[in-house]
């Protein structure tokens, strides 16, 4: 189990800026039977843990000697730089089944793609599962070497689900498939089709700063309501 140390914080609202500059990530821990508590975690240590645990693996959070088994949730990021601005930790009961989403890890090589020129289409990148916290997998592997012929597909019912884990959803729901290669006529027609470029929304530095301020104000004003709302997600 990944471990992460945290400390309570008094800095709220605009006062979290020096905290971030000092290398800490403003956060909050809450959950069933756990009152919402503002905390901070070392930014670099959090990055390491998050890369390994993601949002579906239990992390042991130590807040000055008090341990919580938590899931990392709701990462707020700077829309331009991508830096993390805030993180939520949801404290779970180890004896209660949870419902959460787990990433799909596509491995192997499809013979239909390699030999027949098929097009690999990933319909889903994650699936919803139910399990006790200790049984939650970091990811579920999908072996695409099963896709031997054109139009073949892998469905939820075809997955090798770890023991103690139940996939939620229609068993016949398609996760990934191989489409037949397009004919030259189709490709030529696509080339002649006018392309309309989408205009990306670019936020100014002032807008980014304003959004960060609103995030901090919301956190200071109603951290308890955040915990109650997030508890309904799991």
Image: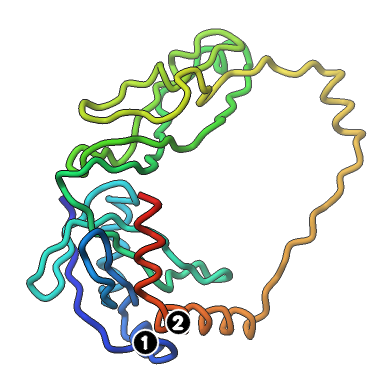
Residue 12's tag is: 1
Seen in the picture, residue 177 relative to 48 is either above or below; the reply is above
| Quarter assignment of residue 165 | top left
Left or right: 127, with 187 as reference point: left
| Quarter assignment of residue 190 | top right
Query: Most extreme residue toward the top, as rendered?
Result: 149
Q: Secondary structure at mark 2?
A: helix
Residue 224's tag is: none
Report how many numbered discs are placed on residues in the image: 2
Query: Most extreme residue toward the left, as rendered?
Result: 65
Residue at x 26% of width, y 75% of height: 37
Residue at x 34% of width, y 41% of height: 99
Contact check, label 1 and label 2, Cβ < 8 Å? yes
What x and y, as percent, mark residue 152?
Answer: 55, 12
Left or right: 172, with 97 as reference point: right
What x and y, as percent, mark residue 85?
Answer: 43, 73
Cα separation, mark 1 vs mark 2, equals 7 Å
Q: Which residue is mark 2?
A: 216
What x and y, as percent, mark residue 125?
Answer: 49, 37
- For the residue pair 49 and 113, the one nearer the viewer reads as 49
| Quarter assignment of residue 177 | top right
Seen in the picture, residue 164 relative to 39 is either above or below; the reply is above
Q: Secondary structure at mark 1?
A: loop
Residue at x 87% of width, y 33% of height: 191
- For the residue pair 119 and 40, the one nearer the viewer reads as 40
- For the residue pair 32 and 213, the one nearer the viewer reads as 32
Left or right: 50, with 197 as reference point: left
Seen in the picture, residue 22 relative to 154 is either above or below; the reply is below
């Amino acid at each position: 189990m990944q471990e992460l140390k945290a400390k309570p914080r008094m800095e709220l609202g605009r006062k979290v800026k020096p905290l971030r500059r000092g290398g800490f990530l403003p956060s909050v821990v809450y959950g069933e039977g756990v009152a919402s508590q503002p905390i901070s975690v070392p930014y670099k240590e959090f990055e390491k843990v998050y890369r390994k645990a993601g949002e579906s693996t239990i992390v042991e959070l130590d807040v000055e000697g008090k341990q919580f088994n938590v899931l990392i949730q709701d990462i707020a990021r700077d829309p331009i730089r991508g830096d993390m601005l805030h993180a939520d930790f949801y404290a779970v009961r180890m004896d209660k089944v949870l419902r959460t989403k787990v990433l799909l890890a596509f491995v192997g090589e499809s013979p239909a793609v390699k030999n027949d020129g098929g097009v690999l289409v990933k319909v889903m990148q994650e699936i919803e599962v139910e399990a006790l916290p200790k049984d939650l997998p970091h990811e579920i592997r999908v072996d695409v070497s099963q896709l031997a012929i054109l139009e073949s597909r892998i469905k939820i019912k075809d997955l090798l689900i770890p023991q103690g884990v139940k996939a939620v959803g229609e068993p016949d729901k398609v996760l990934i498939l191989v489409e037949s290669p397009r004919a030259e006529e189709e490709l030529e027609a696509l080339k002649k089709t006018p392309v309309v470029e989408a205009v990306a929304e670019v936020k100014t530095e002032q807008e980014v700063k304003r959004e960060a301020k609103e995030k901090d104000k919301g956190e200071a004003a109603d951290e308890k309501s955040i915990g109650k709302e997030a508890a309904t997600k799991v």
